[in-house]
Image (cartoon, rainbow, N blue to C red):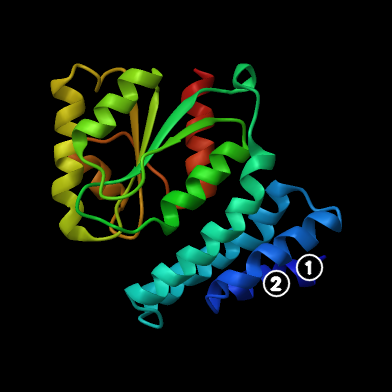
Amino acid sequence: MADQFDLIKKCILEFETEKIGDYVKKALKSGATPVEIIEKGIRPGAELAGEKFDKGEFYLPELVMAGEAIKQGISVLEPLLMKDEKGYKGTVITATVQGDLHDIGKDLVSVMLKGNGFKVIDLGVDVPPEKVVKAVKENDAKVVCLSILLTPAYEGLSATLKALKDSSLREKVKVVLGGAAVSPDTVKRYGADYYGHDANQAVEICNQILAK
């Protein structure tokens, strides 16, 4: 089984978009659960891709290609992670802020949240502040997870937090930040609530918030 997880990781790091789905299906047939495949194959592959980017071994095009492989693997698992709406722990909005087109981290957080029993409204990338506000209102969401990979997108982060405040929603939702451009200092500076170092921590934070 460990070999199959390694093959999934390899597909992410070598951008083998066409192969990863087959390896995910083989792991499922061998008895692995969707969450196990995410935890032992997809998440480690995504983290390694992120580390390579941080070290300058991957540039943005490689990171995007790794993200495409991750999406392909997740697409096989997603139908298996869906829950009956009555069984959801709560609703979480995920988005990459306006000015940033990268989705590798956001996609991983979204699928991990689904695998842990949350209803996830994934707004995509380069999301305008008003779209976040609309999604919070329409879905009565209590948590918004925002991804920022590039520092120029801080402007989009600031605008999103302001839009939530101007719409009288800021006190009703907790805002979790994650991504390569984010640190605990970013959370303090922009007035968000939590910093999620990785997808696992984002899930833990959402569990804490919605358990209150």
Left/right placement of residue 75 relative to residue 109 reads right
Q: Position of residue 172 (x, y in %)?
A: 31, 17
- Which residue is at a point 51% across and 23% down the rendered structure image? 90
Q: Secondary structure at mark 1?
A: helix
Residue in the foreground of this view, choosing between 1 and 64: 64
Residue 193 against residue 13 in the figure, above or below: above
Q: Which residue is mark 1?
A: 2
Considering every residue shown, the one lying at the far front of the view is 18
**Is 171 on the left-hand or right-hand side of 156?**
right
**Residue shown at 77%/48% (left/top)?**
33
Residue drawn where x is 36% and y is 55% of the image: 179
The numbered mark at residue 159 is: none
How packed mark 2 is, by other alpha carbons closer than 10 Å (few <14, some 14-19, many 20 or more), is some
**For the view shown, which residue lies furthest in the bottom direction?**
57
* Type of amino acid at the residue the image marks with label 1: Ala
Eyeballing the image, is 74 above or below 206? Answer: below
Could you say where residue 156 lies in the image, as x and y percent from the top left?
17, 46
Give the residue pinned by disc 2: 6
Residue 121: which quarter of the image? Answer: top left
Tell me whether the residue at label 2 lies in contact with that at label 1, contact meaning CB atoms closer than 8 angstroms. yes
Dot 1: few (<14), some (14–19), or many (≥20) neighbours within 10 Å?
few
Label 2, label 1: how many angstroms apart (C-alpha)?
Answer: 6 Å
Residue 122 is situated, as x and y percent measured from the top left of the image, at 42, 39
Quarter of the image with the N terminus in it:
bottom right
